[in-house]
Amino acid sequence: MNNQDNEKVFQKSQINWFPGHMAKTRREISEKLNLIDIVYEVLDARMPISSKIVDIDDLIKDKPKILVVTKYDLCDTKETDKILEVYKKQGYNVLPIDLMNGNCNELINKTKDIMKKINEERIAKGMKERSARVLIIGVPNVGKSTLINRLVGRKSAGVGNTPGFTKNLSWIRINKDIELLDSPGILWPKIEDQEKAHILASLSSIKEEILNTDQVACFILKKLYELYPKKLYERYGISELDEDYIEAYELIGRKRGALSKGGIVDYEKVSNIIIKDLKSNYFGKITFDRI
Ligand SMILES: Nc1nc2c(ncn2[C@@H]2O[C@H](COP(=O)(O)OP(=O)(O)OP(=O)(O)O)[C@@H](O)[C@H]2O)c(=O)[nH]1
Ligand SMILES: [Mg+2]
């Protein structure tokens, strides 16, 4: 967005991110599927709907799975729990978790329970018992590698707050009972629902470099205004959000000193501030999805 060129305010482009490595990861997951016993489908608690891979069941077929809902410490539990209840009613095994402070005992127990049944079936067929092989799958940046490190109890998988951090599939053993397969975050070729795409972009699951930052920043303002007006007011002093966002940008720019020469508010800087504030969790606990 540019102050001299206000018509740009309304420019919007579709958000999609499906680089070659995601297509490759999908292929490799399909190829390795016969080695997998259980799947941890990882969701971000701030977007338990938007961060769900739309065609996950085509990809992992009928493997038993656990929905591991990470970043529970960052979400608005009241709203997130409503969504998780729906998943439970649909028959999902759901486990919210705070990977910064919580432990993974419940997840390990659930995994052992599922594997026990699988092993009983194996024994009945005359096969040998084996340790559980678990695939960890999810959109970028939801905490798959962090989950692995937590499960293993040491830093085994690379972690970073940028989508696309993990580049390859790799096996990691937790103990004699469980082996994990870390995988790079994946999306799908076309995100039909652009509201979801914007939520994914706002909460750092889409590579920043390909995004129109003004568009994402305006979306964040709109979402906060709709869902958490008090938080928007507390951080930026905004109590009304005008349709073209100009007043809001001017306010934030002056408040935060995002000015260019001559004291004019630098809109690009303001967009970056908004995105960074959300990424740094400065708005407190939020959930952007609603049932
Ligand atoms: N507060 C909080 N932060 C978390 C939690 N889980 C993960 N994170 C943070 O989220 C960021 C992404 O974590 P990663 O484990 O690298 O995510 P990933 O899913 O492996 O990402 P890709 O490899 O890019 O697909 C890191 O900055 C983690 O510290 C959580 O439960 N709570
Ligand atoms: Mg990773």
Image: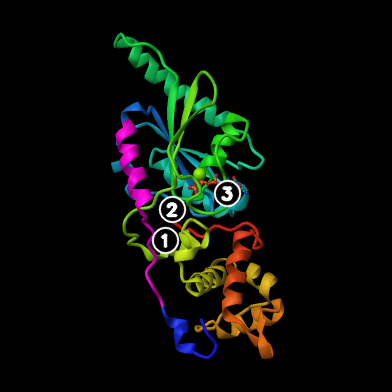
Locate the C terminus and report the quarter of the image it occupies.
Answer: bottom left
Instruction: Please report whichever mark, 3 or 1, sits nearer to the chain's N-terminal start.
Output: 3
Q: Is residue 235 above or below residue 39?
A: below
> In the image, which residues are magenta?
12-33
- Residue type, label 3: Gly
Q: Which mark is residue 196?
A: 1
Q: Verify whether residue 14 appears in magenta.
A: yes
Q: Position of residue 18 (x, y in %)?
A: 36, 56
Q: Position of residue 263 (x, y in %)?
A: 68, 88
Per the image, the residue denoted by label 2 is 49
Instruction: Please report whichever mark, 2 or 1, sits nearer to the chain's N-terminal start.
Output: 2
Per the image, the residue denoted by label 3 is 160
Would you identify the image quadrant in which residue 32 lies? top left
Ligand 1 within 8 angstroms of badge 2 C-beta: no
- Residue at position x 40%, y 76% from top? 12
Q: Position of residue 97 (x, y in %)?
A: 57, 41
Is disc 2 in contact with disc 1, using a CB cutoff of under 8 Å? yes
Distance in Å between CA atoms under marks 3 and 2: 23 Å
